[in-house]
Amino acid sequence: APFYLHDFVRHTKGGRQMNHRRLIYLDTDTVVLGDIAELHDLDLQGHACAAVKYCLQHWDDYMDFDALREQGFAYFSPRSCIANRGVMVIDAPAWRRQNITGKIEDWLLLYRQSRRPLWVGGMSQPPWLLALNGDFMELSEDWNCNSLGRDTMSAREVADLRKVGFDRSGLRILGRNLSKKGQVSPFVITCSRSGKLLHFNGAMKPWLLDGDTEQAGLPSCSLPARFPVSAWSWSVLVQLFCRGVAFLSCADLWSAFLTPEAGCAMKDFDQEWRDDEVKWHNRRKELQVAREQEKKEELERQAEVDKAQLDLQALIAQKSDDVYTIADLENKAGYERIV
């Protein structure tokens, strides 16, 4: 959708042309805390678009550079920072002039024709990165505080946590553990404190979360300084460089803007029942497996008892035979002495 906005909004339903030199695109999983009019007034300095750079992920996290070289593209840098296209400011004339949409479509065609995948991570972000190849205006992190819906933090992202003052004690307070690979799950977000746009990219969308999920299993966000609500389902205070910072469930930041009616309207009741049925089926299956395992262990224990009893009986019988044999020998020896 964002790659065709410049054409989609060109005409209104009445057929009148719109002045759409500046377009602002936000993914639907975004919470707005700042004044996006600031984005409208930005000077993009000739760039077709503006976006937020994210240097905790690099191009080689998405692109297969061997496959790209096979296609004749050897000039891309594997260690370049990615940008997240969930928040974009588009200069429509420059976008058309530089044929950004056409370049994205060319990359999608190359992907389809390639003997092996040129990238991972979907059909939107990677071809957009390749089409721009770093030619965009960089926005500050506040305009796309992302990863509010992600699960696992990479070792690189965890290292960035340490830079803002997190230690193991802080992770324990949030119910997080550091894995042997240096990863943390689920995500801990600190940019939300000053973020103007909060982006719930990732699989853990707040509207899909199970009500039974423990807080320790949900992404945690630092409390936004500009947030108007003060009541939360859960919150803790973490010391970062000897300063107390409040953290809460990121999902609360999403639901705080929803009225009960809106929350109910967004709810997929059929999916909820399907999810429950799957959980019930899995629980029944787990109980059945547990019962079968318990029965198997009981049979094994009984077999061990039976074997032990047989061994004991055989030992008793053997000892009895030995006694009788000795008695016989003694009787025979006594008989011989008498004779």
Image (spheres, rainbow, N blue to C red):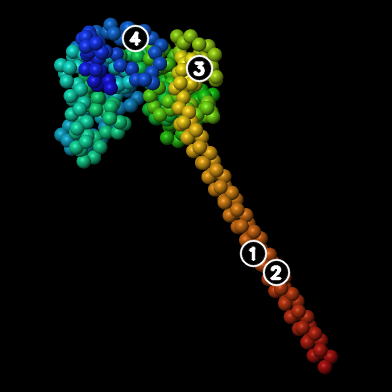
Asked whether the residues under the numbered discs 2 and 1 touch, taking CB atoms below 8 Å apart as contact, a structural biologist would say no
Q: Which residue is identified by label 2?
A: 313
Q: Which mark is residue 247?
A: none
Q: Nearer the viewer, mark 1 or mark 4?
A: 4
Residue closer to the observer: 148 or 164: 148
Name the element at disc 4: loop
Three-letter amino acid code of the residue under disc 3: Pro
Task: Left or right? Give the position of 67 relative to 237.
Answer: left
- N-terminal of the pair, mark 4 or mark 2, is 4
Name the element at disc 2: helix
- N-terminal of the pair, mark 1 or mark 3, is 3
Asked whether the residues under the numbered discs 4 and 2 touch, taking CB atoms below 8 Å apart as contact, a structural biologist would say no
- Residue 14 lies, in percent from the top left, at 24, 11
- Residue 252 lies, in percent from the top left, at 49, 19
Q: Which residue is identified by label 3?
A: 260
- N-terminal of the pair, mark 3 or mark 4, is 4
Q: Which residue is found at the position 66% from the left and 67% from the top?
A: 311
- N-terminal of the pair, mark 1 or mark 4, is 4
- Residue 214 lies, in percent from the top left, at 53, 28
Question: Alpha-carbon neighbours of circle 3 within 10 Å: few (<14), some, or many (≥20)?
Answer: few
Three-letter amino acid code of the residue under disc 2: Gln
Q: Which residue is identified by label 1?
A: 307
Whether residue 45 is visible here, answered yes or no, is no
Q: CA distance from mark 4 to mark 2?
A: 88 Å
